[in-house]
Amino acid sequence: MRLVFATHNEHKLKEVQLLLPKHIHLLSLNDIGLEEEIPETGETLEENAQIKVDYVTQEYGYNCFADDTGLLVNALNGEPGVYSARYAGPQNNANQNMDKLLAALEGISDREAQFKTVIALSLNGNSISFNGIVYGKITTKKAGNRGFGYDPIFMPNGYSLTFAELPVSVKNKIGHRGKAVAQLIAYLNTHKNCS
């Protein structure tokens, strides 16, 4: 089965490729010749994921899935949420995003947060979505060099290390994207004969 993952993010692509079964041949947006960013104009993670899937399916004719992920911080009323990637501006700079978040939480004791991933799938004209959530807290400083995005400042519940300090195999098992992808895989495994 050929399936497009609507992303330009190589970290995300590699992370998901490790999780997918062998019968799925994963293509990125670059692989299908789509080099521009698909505008994420939705007001929710669900809307943004669906926008990307619809664009690839309608313009390129591929079965496709897309994800949108947000970091929701309790003390900030769910911010940065749908704006997580561009929290510090349109340049989508992870260090600047983390710095802004750490500054916003300075002096605040409630550092509870959750990462949420929504995956939208369009397969042979059918649309379905999957959700993955992991709960944790925002640390007071960056730690670790694995992962990407907010991983150096997010410590999942039950662990004393950030996502950026944990091995990728552990992050994939307990993380938001891993949980959503597991649901996607279960669905795809029941539709093996779809092309």
Image (cartoon, helix red, strand yellow):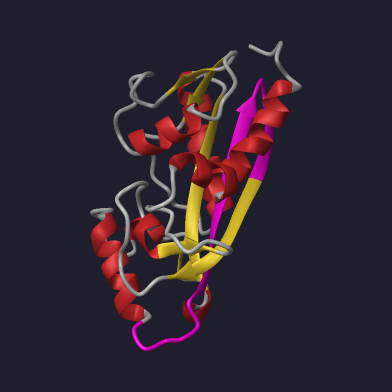
Q: Is residue 191 above or below residue 102?
A: above
Kindly report the secondary structure that dominates the magenta region of the rendered protein. Answer: strand
Q: Is residue 67 above or below residue 144?
A: above
Task: Answer whether residue 107 is magenta in the image.
Answer: yes
From the viewer's side, name the closer residue of 117 and 158. Answer: 158
Picture coordinates of residue 117, whole percent (x, y): 55, 50
Residue in the image at 49% along x and 70% along y: 137
Picture coordinates of residue 54, whole percent (x, y): 54, 34
From the viewer's side, name the closer residue of 110 and 46. Answer: 110
**Split into 4 quadrants, where in the image is the N terminus?**
top right
Can you tell which quarter of the image residue 162 is in?
Answer: bottom left
Picture coordinates of residue 180, whole percent (x, y): 61, 43
Q: How many numbered marks does the figure carry? A: 0
Is residue 176 something one can see in this rendering?
yes
Residue in the image at 32% along x and 61% along y: 143
**As drawn, is 12 to the left or to the right of 142?**
right
**As drawn, is 110 to the left or to the right of 106?**
right
Can you tell which quarter of the image residue 108 is in?
Answer: bottom left
Residues in magenta?
Answer: 106-130
- Residue closest to the far right: 190
Residue in the image at 45% along x and 35% along y: 15
Picture coordinates of residue 142, whole percent (x, y): 30, 64
Residue in the image at 67% along x and 33% along y: 127
- Residue closest to the far bottom: 107
From the viewer's side, name the closer residue of 60 and 81. Answer: 81
Task: Answer whether residue 60 is magenta in the image.
Answer: no
